[in-house]
Amino acid sequence: MASTTEENYLKALFNLANPQGEVNISELAHQMQVSMPTVNSMVKNLQKQGWVIYEKYKPVLLTPEGKKTAALVIRKHRLTEMFLVTKMGFGWEEVHEIAEQVEHIHAQKLFERMDEMMGYPTVDPHGSPIPDKLGRMQEIHYKNLSQAKAGQEVLLAALADSSTEFLQFLNSRNLSLGMELKVVSKEPFDQSMVVSYEGKSAETLSEKVCEKLLVRILD
Amino acid sequence: MASTTEENYLKALFNLANPQGEVNISELAHQMQVSMPTVNSMVKNLQKQGWVIYEKYKPVLLTPEGKKTAALVIRKHRLTEMFLVTKMGFGWEEVHEIAEQVEHIHAQKLFERMDEMMGYPTVDPHGSPIPDKLGRMQEIHYKNLSQAKAGQEVLLAALADSSTEFLQFLNSRNLSLGMELKVVSKEPFDQSMVVSYEGKSAETLSEKVCEKLLVRILD
DNA sequence: GAATTTTGTTAGAATAATCTAACAATATAA
DNA sequence: TTATATTGTTAGATTATTCTAACAAAATTC
Ligand SMILES: [Mn+2]
Ligand SMILES: [Mn+2]
Ligand SMILES: [Mn+2]
Ligand SMILES: [Mn+2]
């Protein structure tokens, strides 16, 4: 069974994988906040356990086993976040840190019960998909708000950044998932947008912000 | 900050302490399921951190800091057990294992929120007291059911054993905390008792069982 | 294509938590 | 009060996770 440390590495590999599934040692070291030699030895360990494919000087790849193990940890993380928000009244900006610890609890029952109590949610409070019990995660292909054109209406469906700081920024603008936004105008100079939504008739959002808002374009 | 391992040792010390607060190395080794040399080195480590008083060949004692740290872990454990039972529908026989892991989560907020949602319970699902936020635990002095005399009525208030096996035994007899029991008779030969309670008019309980049922004698 | 920078590996060491084997102190029994 | 049993300690080793320093390979720049 994977240790907490190993689970965190597997999750990082899952999240960092490029379209070919590859992750460089340096990226992983950066993500995990450890030195490259540390990653080098951990990767050898993960390989021995059958969770990654690794050859000297080549990027690391998760095996199907590794992918499944990672996805099941992510499932516990996201179920926990959703439970904390919907059943315990936490704000979406408070739950990641807690879930980062709870995800390592080995008690299937606990998470199955959360799932059941919530009615089997498919996404977490930040709009990220929750993998199923078999570790299958369905890819959802959203657009950035920055790709929308003036006049279009969109549904805010997920976030490309779930950091506390970004979530607090969204709170300060009264933005939350499920809202309909209308692009009032787009500034050609800096790609910033003026949008209107529930209560706000003209809120300006920078390109940086718009790129992190994942939307479904309506009609 | 105490590691998970250190927290588990502190908790064991807290629970094993005799009236003078002393714990022998061998008892601790037995409780923790590790060898005596392992305990010896851990005790030296706990001493360095100011959690225990220790001299070669003498029993170990928790310091006030050690006691407080232990009590706060026990608080998290018991709040978790109570939350799992009252808010998530788990049986009292299922929660100890899960709480054993959840108690090590470093997120004050999580436990404060559980506490709040439950309306600040004072005991866990097995009748054990929940320490307060400052780590103060009030001693409750119950009697064993085996100390009751024939004809007496008692309130089942807590358990001296919260093992899954014992809890399942109690489930099988439909016994739960808060019930009133009447001692119908006591067998002088083996100290077994015949008791009556909700629905059962004559259930025989062995001395072993009666010693583990903590009661308040009524009237 | 050679020089430089970046990325990755090896070697060697540290800390936490554990073990077994050997020995020493304390407690119990004869 | 010796002998024996129990309890506790030391020494030395192991595994997991991490580090720094030194070196090597690969990628990038000139
Ligand atoms: Mn998260
Ligand atoms: Mn984590
Ligand atoms: Mn318990
Ligand atoms: Mn524990």
Image (cartoon, coloured by chain):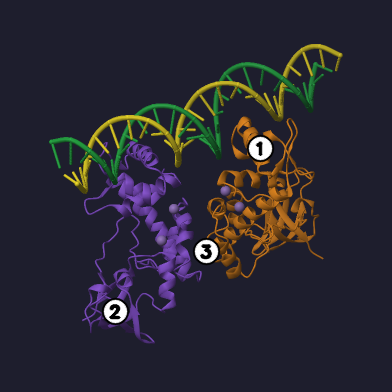
Chain colours: A purple, B orange, C green, D yellow
The picture quadrant where one finds residue A187 is bottom left
Q: Is residue A69 visible?
A: no
Q: Amino acid at mark 3?
A: Gly
Q: Nearer the viewer, residue B58 or D27?
A: D27
Disc nearest the viewer among 3 and 1: 1
The correct choice, above or below, for B198 with respect to A147 in the image is above
Percent coordinates x, y for residue B199 in the rendering: 64, 64
Q: Quadrant of residue A92?
A: bottom left
Q: In x, y percent, where is residue B48?
A: 66, 40
| C-alpha separation, residue under disc 1 versus residue under disc 2 | 62 Å
Q: Residues within 10 Å of mark 2 (few under 14, many from 20)?
A: many
Q: Callout 3: 10 Å neighbours few (<14), some, many (20+)? A: few
Q: Is disc 1's CB within 8 Å of ligand 4? A: no
Cα separation, mark 3 vs mark 1, equals: 39 Å
Q: Which quadrant: the C terminus of chain A?
A: bottom left
The residue labelled by disc 3 is: B89
Residue indicated by mark 2: A193
**Chain where mark 1 sits:** B
* In-image side of A135 versus B170 (left or right): left
Describe the element under mark 3 as helix, strand or loop.
loop
According to the picture, the residue beneath numbered tag 1 turns out to be: B43
**Mark in front: 1 vs 2:** 2
Tell which circle, 3 or 1, labels the residue nearer the N-terminal end: 1
Amino acid type of the residue tagged 2 in the rendering: Met
Percent across and percent down for residue B126 are: 64, 57
